[in-house]
Amino acid sequence: MWRLGFFFHEMAFGLLSIFIPLYMVTKAATGGLGGSLVGLGIMVSSALLCNIPASFFWGYICDKTRRYKAYILLSFMSTTIILYVVTLTSNVVFFTILYVIMSVFNVAHEAPKNVLIAEHYSHEEWEKSYAFYQRLTELGWLIGLFLGLIASYFSLTAQYTLFLCSGLNLVAFVLTIFLVTDPIMIFERRLVSIEKKIDFTYRGARIVSQILEGLRLRRKFKEESFLAFAIALVFFSLASSTFFTPLPIFFVQDLAFSTRMVFMVYMLHSGGAIAGYFFVSRRPSDMDAKTQIRRIALFRSLLVFLLVAVVQTALLTTLFAVIVLVLLNFAYAVYYVLALSLSMELMPAGRTGVFDVLIGLGTASGSFLGPFLAQTFGFLPQFLVAAAIFLLAFAILRVFS
């Protein structure tokens, strides 16, 4: 029940995920701000760059104070207020500034949420618990997209759409007050860290024993490389945001989709993520997470290359584009849960914000790179660059982990 506030929060951001790019880029005469793709990229990348120190700070301060609920409440309340203030302006620069401020406060709930799940459940249940949380919030995201579809059908003004998103965050704030509680004791992550050190020492002792007995070694003795994992996280998120940031504009401009059609496509896209979270919560426990993450990076690269081929041949473009998007989000759902669970094992208390920092570093860069490439060279070269970066993430994981 404590996750219910996050459900309403994600409803708001599911709607905003399509509304904001279209609102920013469409002409002022049709209710938008009349900005450019590069302006959209600057806005989103600026927000994500500011999120990098913010994510580290929120992760550090919540572990330092051992207060998690307070930062979740701060996130939801500040988002509520800022979305209301956004309704009072139609200036692109002011809108950009407000968006950046909102983004910085919005990430305040991410690290506390990750810790709450890690400390409320045992290590063996982490993947299923993260998958359940993501499945629930993805359902909220999907409903938010449906609300956007309804809003576009009834031609709801931008102001009323923003009021709706502000109200949903206010509901999230109220529910969090009553449903979320801080853990009484903080020890699960420390236990996992101790277990990993003991396991590493034990494996080392076994190998030394085998060497002394003259036995041939059949297994590698290598400690998990957090550096390789971190670099791969950055490149994977770089590729994802390079591909996805200008995608709603691609649908409107190149495929001539209506706003309603864009919301419908993204609803199917979100459905792929929900299926992915169901899948990962039921995966065999002996399945190696690092191997699966590596395979997903390769799979996403191939899917983006396939999308380019489909657009080039103009053969059932809409159908195949939707199928590719659904598979991309299915793969991301599996990847995100495995990567998040693995990061909680590798990172000590006080550094839980590092995961969001790494994701934010790649996403911030890609959020500018994607729109810049799309406006300068076109959407297909932009897709090819994203596919190549996914391939690079796969290579890093292949070589170093």
Image (cartoon, rainbow, N blue to C red):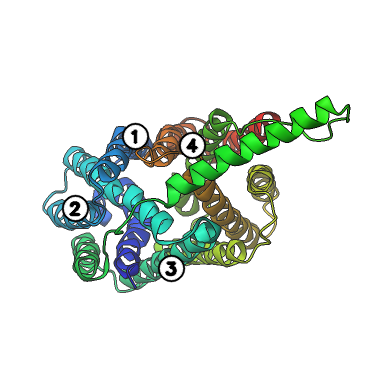
Amino acid at dot 3: Leu
Q: Quadrant of the N terminus?
A: bottom left
Q: Residue at x 11, y 53 (%)?
A: 88
What secondary structure is found at the residue carrying circle 2? helix
User: Residue 136 got which mark?
Assistant: 3
Q: Tell me whether circle 4 and circle 2 mark residues in contact (CB < 8 Å).
A: no
* Mark-to-mark CA distance, 2 and 3: 21 Å
Q: Earlier in the sequence, mark 2 or mark 3?
A: 2
Q: Residue at x 66, y 42 (%)?
A: 294
Q: Tell me whether circle 4 and circle 3 mark residues in contact (CB < 8 Å).
A: no
> Mark 2 Cα within 10 Å, few/some/many (few <14, many 20+)?
some
Q: Which residue is mark 4?
A: 374
Question: Along the horizontal axis of the image, is 285 left or right of 65?
Answer: right
Based on the displayed image, in which of its 4 quarters is residue 15 positioned?
A: bottom left
Residue 189 coordinates in the image, percent (x, y): 44, 48
* Mark-to-mark CA distance, 1 and 2: 18 Å
